[in-house]
Image (cartoon, coloured by chain):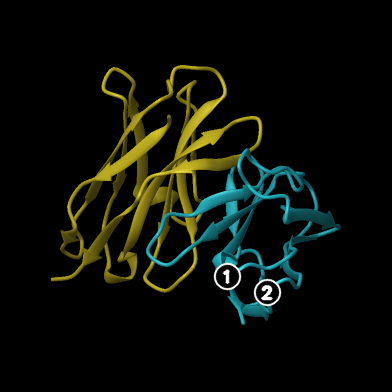
Chain colours: A cyan, B yellow
Amino acid sequence: QSALTQPPSTSGSPGQSVTISCTGTSSDIGNYNYVSWYQQHPGKAPKLIIYGVTKRPSGVPDRFSGSKSGNTASLTVSGLQAEDEADYYCSSYAGSDNFAVFGGGTKLTVL
Amino acid sequence: QITLKESGPTLVKPTQTLTLTCTYSGFSLSASGVGVGWIRQPPGKALEWLALIYWSDDKRYSPSLRSRLTITKDTSKNQVVLRMTNMDPVDTATYSCAHSRYSTKDFDYWGQGILVTVSS
């Protein structure tokens, strides 16, 4: 069982927006602004798409955005495209003794 | 550009010790603020963070696996080594190393991963 809770799956049509939630506790998401999101296509390595709750690495489209409220972080993908179909994982820093905790992953299907 | 590549055995027997090597390029693990971590992913399952080593040689381990893990670095060879003792079939997974930034606590560059199967 993963430390952070994500919905197993979500879907949307091209052009629509979807939001993926990631729920933790006051020991991780609620206590630090170090939430990151990773996109993973089948058979590929994870790719960092959001860090520091809201920041996007260079080259990541601004269709991807992140936010946080209390113990829950969210990833929103706007203007869905076929290539956005992938697994998405959230992660949070959880203190010096537990550097990173991950969510169970959410499979995004573009209908 | 930053690249990382994992190497090691793809098949180990139960109770054996797994030793994996991460060979990196494009950055210095002697530079302030830099770290290299290990993450694993069982087939069809979620990511799990295992260990992290910083430029300062400060080391961090997953609390649930701390007793079985050792992470070391050899900056002269641009390598980070992970040892995991007492391997079990439930440890079957793709093991990946990744570049980390102290300032943002994330993994911004990943290796391709190596699938390790634990079976007799």
Q: Residue furthest bottom?
A: A111
Residue at position x 66%, y 79% in the image: A10
Question: Which three-letter amino acid code belongs to the residue tagged 1?
Answer: Ala
Q: Position of residue A35 (x, y in %)?
A: 70, 49
> Is residue A26 depicted above or below B97 in this figure?
below
- Residue A37: quadrant of the picture: bottom right
Measured Cα–Cα span from mark 1 to mark 2: 7 Å
Question: Which three-letter amino acid code belongs to the residue tagged 2?
Answer: Pro
Residue at position x 13%, y 71% in the image: B120
> Is residue B85 depicted above or below B91 in this figure?
above
- Residue A96: quadrant of the picture: top right
From this viewpoint, is residue A104 visible?
Answer: no
Can you identify the residue that label 1 sits on? A82
Disc number placed over residue A92 in the picture, else none: none
Q: Position of residue A91 (x, y in %)?
A: 62, 54
Can you identify the residue that label 2 sits on? A14
